[in-house]
Amino acid sequence: MNRHKNFIKLLQSAVTLQIMNTDAHIQVSRLGSALKSLKIAVVTETYPPDINGVAHTLSKIVEGLQALGHDLWLIRPKQQAQHMAVQTAHFQEVLVKGVPIPFYSELRMGLPAKRELHRLWAKQRPDIVHIATEGPLGWSALQVARKLKLPVSTDFRTNFHAYSQHYGIGWLSGAIRVYLKKFHNRADVTMVPTAMLQQELQAKGFERVQVVPRGVDTSQFSPSYRSLALRQSWGVAEGDKVLLYVGRLAAEKNLGLVVQAYLKAKQSDARTRLVLVGDGPMREALQLQYPDIVFAGYRSGADLAAHYASGDVFVFASLTETFGNVTLEAMASGLAVVAFKHAAAGQCIRHGDNGMCVDTESPHDFVQAVCSVVEAPSLQMRLAKEALLTAKTFDWPGVVERTEAVFRQVMAGNYQQESLVLEMSLQRAP
């Protein structure tokens, strides 16, 4: 029994490590005052001030649900000793114990908190429990919610097979897949950001999987934040092309191919520069090997928006994302995007129209696509213009209301997409 428990804990640690890392525009018609406000418990291993896609997306959902008048409990690990739980009239933060994540020491994973959660939810029963991550804290929340017969929704945010190969736990990938399927199939619904991922999971036996896309704040990310002074600080002159990457500097992001594309593009135009925004375990080695690359480090807020908008071509070679918010952020910032036909790019980009989206099995095509955009300013400008128009169709309010619709669907006991409580319409993005 103890060996079994220890193995489960190992799987949960591996899963937590990984999670940190449609042409459809959905409109939802709310039913006005007929919809009562909900008491929603959100459980997550990561949340701002953590810097990652899961934390950012979840904060937008939480803020949006609050704006719709719902009461929220946010249960998450305490990241630093001085952090204090936030509590307002309609928002209560519950901080639980956490430990550093192996290979990702800047973040912590939550430890199981069954006793604390049972006491909290037995006293103040939530209408629904939403579990955003599948680590030890999420597993304990799932067990308590099932025991108390509470409706449960989950997010799937783990590319378990791809990530495990990069962190020396490839031998665990099969067991991790079994654990994740068991985890999500105990929930009433699992939300995923793309139809492609929905189909992939359903083929592997995951049940009740629904698509809830991600959004982008086009007031926060905009070409208007382009900064000549910032470009000059990179050593960029007028007419030079800046290739930009935003994300963790880690093996799972396929940065080797990004650098390869940069070196190839530089052969055509020596004034091409590569700017890497972010940090991670590969930074030191990359700096030593490629001193001409600009390493901008972690950026946030208006500073991050300026870095996006001051680039020209966004190069994103990752194949391990479940979505990849950076793709939409780059499009909203007016950049021509080159990426693989995967995750957000596979959903949002029409190759040669609003970006360059190549087959996942063709790294050569990725490099050539980067070069073709760098060598043709008119193509880069056209792709950037169309990318901006596409990004404007992915608004956060619509995503939040779609999430709320799924919550109400689960509470009503209806799990199929056609039985949504709220009227929904799908319009293809222009």
Image (spheres, grey):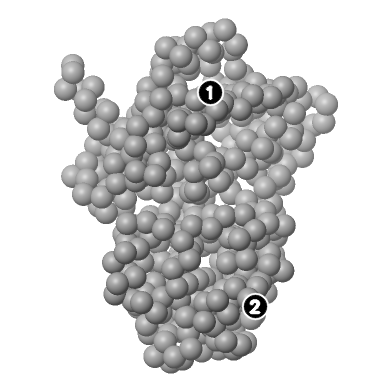
For the residue pair 313 and 407, the one nearer the viewer reads as: 313
**Residue 277 location (% of width, % of height):** 48, 64
Label 1's element? strand
**69 displayed left or right of 7:** right
Q: Crowding at label 2, few (<14), some or many (≥20) Cα neighbours within 10 Å?
A: some
In the displayed image of the protein, which residue is found farthest to the front?
82
**344 displayed left or right of 110:** right
Q: Crowding at label 1, few (<14), some or many (≥20) Cα neighbours within 10 Å?
A: many
- Kind of residue at disc 1: Val
Q: Which residue is mark 2?
A: 228
Q: Residue at x 61, y 27 (%)?
A: 86
**Which comes before the other along the chain, label 2 or label 1?**
1
Res. 378 image quadrant: bottom right
Query: Disc 2 or disc 1, which is closer to the eye?
Result: 2
Is residue 59 shown above or below 295? above
**Residue 267 location (% of width, % of height):** 39, 90
Q: Residue at x 77, y 39 (%)?
A: 29
**89 displayed left or right of 310:** right
Can you see residue 285?
A: yes
Q: Residue at x 83, y 26 (%)?
A: 33
Q: How far apart in space, not on screen, are marks 2 and 1 (Cα)?
A: 44 Å
**Residue 24 location (% of width, % of height):** 63, 54
Is residue 266 shown above or below 201? below
Label 2's element? helix
Q: Residue at x 29, y 46 (%)?
A: 103
Can you see residue 256?
A: no
Q: Tell me the tag on residue 94.
A: 1
- Assess whether mark 1 and mark 2 are in contact (beta carbons under 8 angstroms): no
Is residue 175 shown above or below 7? below
